[in-house]
Image (cartoon, grey):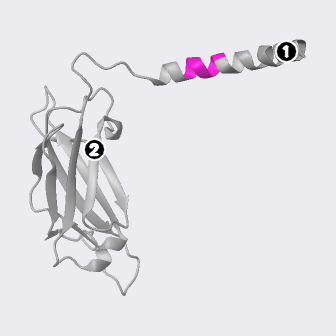
Amino acid sequence: MMNSIAIVLRRLLPGVLLCVVFLAGCSQAPSKDGTPGKVVGTVSLDPRVPLWMTHGSLTVVALMKGPTSPDWLPVAQVIFIHPTFPVPFEISQADVRLSGISFKGPVRLVARLSLESGSSLVASGEYSGTDPIDGAVGGAPVRILINKKLPSVAGSGP
């Protein structure tokens, strides 16, 4: 009996060690500056925006200025398919799409509601907030209102 337990343990030991090594590799030590935080907020829909637009997708984009960039550049985004408003959101380091970017400091947030209907009964379109909203990573929650119809690009070709 004791011999069979020893055999089972010997067979399981490499797998257990592999799991321990894998899990140790998944953990991250906090950086010297502290752990990058999150931007949280809510996106609301103006009553004048057609309700069929909620069958599309909502994208919230965080823009940051880099130490060498004079412009605000998109660095992170979250997407919601068929959103139900108001939509709570959070953007963190996990949502950053550019390598080497630390998600911290001041940000600007832009939300866009888009629908590609492909139907003659429901119009495609895009709506956004009037202006980008200023916020900060780890700062107070922000509120974005989708209230502006964006110009259609369909039929703008030659």
Q: Quadrant of residue 138?
A: top left
Whether residue 25 is visible here, answered yes or no, is yes
Foreground pick, 32 / 102: 32
Residue at horizontal 19 percent and vertical 65 percent from the top: 44
Please give the label number shown on residue 147.
none
x then y, percent, for residue 8: 82, 19
x then y, percent, for residue 129: 14, 62
* Residues in magenta, as a range: 17-22
Foreground pick, 40 / 79: 40
Count of numbered marks: 2
On-image quarter of the N terminus: top right
Mark 2 or mark 1, which has the lower sequence index?
A: 1
Report the amino acid beneath label 1: Ile
In the displayed structure, would residue 129 be above or below residue 149? above
On-image quarter of the C terminus: bottom left
Report the amino acid beneath label 2: Ile
In the displayed structure, would residue 61 be above or below residue 121? above
Residue at horizontal 30 percent and vertical 26 percent from the top: 100
Residue occupying the far front of the picture: 1
Q: Is residue 121 left or right of residue 38?
A: right
Q: What residue sits right under mark 2 in the picture?
A: 91
The dominant secondary structure in magenta is: helix
Foreground pick, 60 / 138: 138
Please give the label number shown on residue 7.
1
Tag 2's secondary structure?
Answer: strand
x then y, percent, for residue 25: 50, 20
Q: Within 10 angstroms of label 2, few (less than 14), some, or many (20 or more) residues?
A: many
x then y, percent, for residue 2: 87, 13
Q: In which quarter of the image is residue 115?
A: bottom left
Whether residue 124 is visible here, answered yes or no, is no
Q: In this view, does 76 lie to the left or right of 135?
A: right
